[in-house]
Amino acid sequence: MKKSSIAATFVHQIVEGASAQGLDCMPILQRHGISPLSLQRSLEDTANQSVPDGQEARIPLDNFARASVEIMTALDDEYLGLCSKPQRLGSFNMMARACISARTIKRSLRRCARYWNLFENTFEHNVLISSGRLYYQIDLRPDQSALNAYAWEAILSTTHRFHCWLAGQFIPLKAVSLPYPPSKHREETQRLFYGAQINYDQPTAMIEMDGRFTNVEIVQNSDTLDTYLAGSNLSLLYQPKNYRVIGDQVRQWLEKNLRQGNYHCTLKQAAEHLRISQQVLHRRLQSESTSFKEVKMQTRRDIAINMLSQGRHRVEEIATLVGFSEPSAFIRAFKSWTGETPLMYKQKASSGDRD
């Protein structure tokens, strides 16, 4: 998996349902390197409106994914206890097997919705086609509820990413509608949907796709599905490997160059690697609500966060590996990224190490 990170506030969201059911999640989180100090800081960040976007407490995405899967297993609920009705383990597996023979993306989405609606689920799923657009919509059923935004976002993003995998290509989203106000971490939510426009406070929740993708044929089969499902957990859902938007491709190229000691990568070099012009690369990154500078910063930040979380590397070593000639410059940069020094982050992460 790529060395990505995620705002620690998402950890609070995934444990809310489990905690309400009496599951002590702290030992699970600590087994996966998520420290109580990091969680406490994320609560303080959320309460402190003056903390700039991007400086919230962050944790490695690997750790988040592994902890999520363990909580799902403990609860026997793929919804993590966030919804009125549980989704038993294996539900996603069976839905995927129901969709693999659907032939086209439109048929698969309809089959997906019908599958979920067979059961006493929290949400009603629907597929709508109108004015050259395809919509996958979810609404709370009467007398049902979801504890927080993660429930909605996980269902919609999982549906989108699974169908990208079925198609063997990225299916861009025209827009996303969510039935609640934006949070302090709305930029993180937008990244979850690959930079698509997100409309908040809407009467329904849905993802919107261009209608020309409705008849895209499914390229996967039962054999590739077995392989997919063998590793199908939150890490796959957050890090699609078979279809990458341009920001992911730039990030992968940057990671490779940093490992090889090429610390001064430029937009021009990235464009040459991707065989497109600088102007096209700039526009495509802009369409994903990012930039070359932003992707480069996030790549260096996330590599540093992962290495600090491992606890095996000195700050000076990490500074060099992410392209800083002086540790002091790295310390200043890391503090601007996360709001704390590398040593502070390392000490907090160590309190969540496995026993």
Image (cartoon, rainbow, N blue to C red):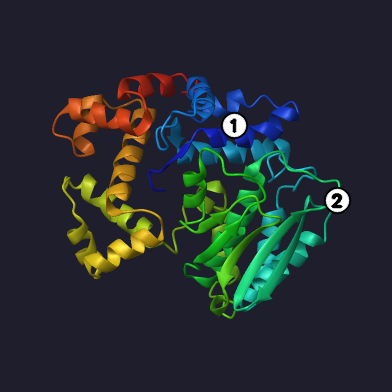
Residue 351 visible to the viewer: yes
Q: Residue furthest left?
A: 325
Question: Within the image, what quadrant is residue 138 found in?
Answer: bottom right
Q: Residue at x 61, y 36 (%)?
A: 13
Q: Secondary structure at mark 1?
A: helix
Q: Residue at x 50, y 33 (%)?
A: 8
Residue 223 visible to the viewer: no
**Mark linked to residue 12:** 1
Q: Secondary structure at mark 2?
A: loop
Q: Residues within 10 Å of mark 1 (few under 14, many from 20)?
A: some
Question: Camera-side residue: 87 or 171?
Answer: 171
Q: Residue at x 55, y 60 (%)?
A: 161
71 relative to 173, above or below: above
**Mark linked to residue 142:** 2
x and y percentages locating residue 63 in the rendered image = 49, 36
Question: Within the image, what quadrant is residue 198 found in?
Answer: bottom right
x and y percentages locating residue 339 in the rendered image = 37, 27
Q: What amino acid type is highlighted by mark number 2? A: Pro
Q: Residue at x 60, y 74 (%)?
A: 133
x and y percentages locating residue 65 in the rendered image = 53, 41
Q: Is residue 296 left or right of residue 117?
A: left
